[in-house]
Amino acid sequence: MLNKLNRKNSGYTLMEALVAISVIVFAIVGPLSLAAKSLADSQFAKDQITAFYLAQDAIEWVHNMKDTTSLNGKWDDIKSKCVSKCDVDTISSKVRQCDGIGGVCSQLQVKSTGLRIYRVKELLLGALDYVNSRFVRSTTVTQTASLPTEYRITVNVSWQNGTNPRNLNISEYLYRD
C-alpha cells in the first residue's frame, strides 16, 4: 500500500507540465523575435543610408553642373527640366523631366555585378548588366522668391521596405553668380 502512494505522488501534474512548457517556449521565442526585429531594423538602416547617398549624389551633381556648365546653356536646361521633378543620371550627366501628372520619376537601376552603381532606367542605353532597384529619386531646382541668384535643390528618394513606403528628403540652397 505504501508503494502505491509513493508511485502516485512521484509523477508531474498537468499544471506543472504546462508551466514547464510555457517557460521553455518563452525562453526560445523571446530571443528569436528579437533577432528577427534586429534583422528588419538593419535592412531599414541599410536602405536609409543608400537613400541618403543617392540624394547627396544628385545634389552634388547639380552643384557641379552649375559650376561647370553655366556658360554653355546646360544649367538653363537643368533648371527648366527640374522645375517640377526630374530624373538625374549622375553617371551619364543626363537629365529628363519626370512623366505624368505629379511627375512620376523612374525607378533607379543598379549594376548587378561589381560596384553598386545606380542609374536612371530610361537614360540607360544598351546597358544590360543593370537590374531594378527599390529606389526612385526625383530632383527639383526652384528659384527662391527672396533672391534671384538663389536656388533651392530638393531631392526626394523613396522606396518600399516590405509593405511600408519610405521617403527621404534633402534640400540645399545654391547661389549663382
Image (cartoon, rainbow, N blue to C red):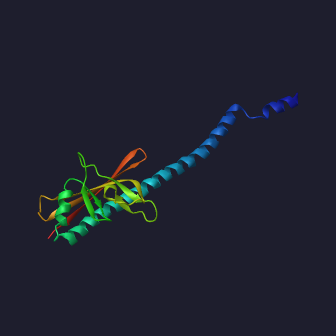
In this view, which residue lies farthest toward the top?
1
Query: How many numbered marks does the figure carry?
Result: 0
Residue 49 visible to an observer of this rendering = no
Which residue is painted at 43% across and 46% down in the image?
162
Which residue is painted at 46% across and 62% down in the image?
113
Estimate the x, y position of residue 64 in percent, counting from the top left. Answer: 25, 69
Which residue is painted at 16% across and 68% down in the image?
176
Estimate the x, y position of residue 8 in percent, counting from the top left. Answer: 80, 30
Q: Quadrant of the N terminus?
A: top right
Estimate the x, y position of residue 150 in percent, counting from the top left. Answer: 15, 64
**In front of the other: 145 or 97:** 97
- Where 123 falls versus 10 (above or below)? below
In this view, which residue lies farthest toward the front?
126
**In front of the other: 166 or 79:** 79
- Where 96 falls versus 91 (above or below)? above
Q: Quadrant of the C terminus?
A: bottom left
Q: In screen coordinates, is 61 left or right of 12?
A: left
Estimate the x, y position of residue 73 in percent, counting from the top left. Answer: 16, 67
Q: In screen coordinates, is 46 left or right of 97?
A: right
Could you say which quadrant of the image residue 122 lies in?
bottom left
Could you say which quadrant of the image residue 80 lies in?
bottom left
Which residue is painted at 67% across and 32% down in the image?
15
**In front of the other: 130 or 19:** 130
Residue 12 visible to an observer of this rendering = yes
- Where 79 falls versus 106 (above or below)? below
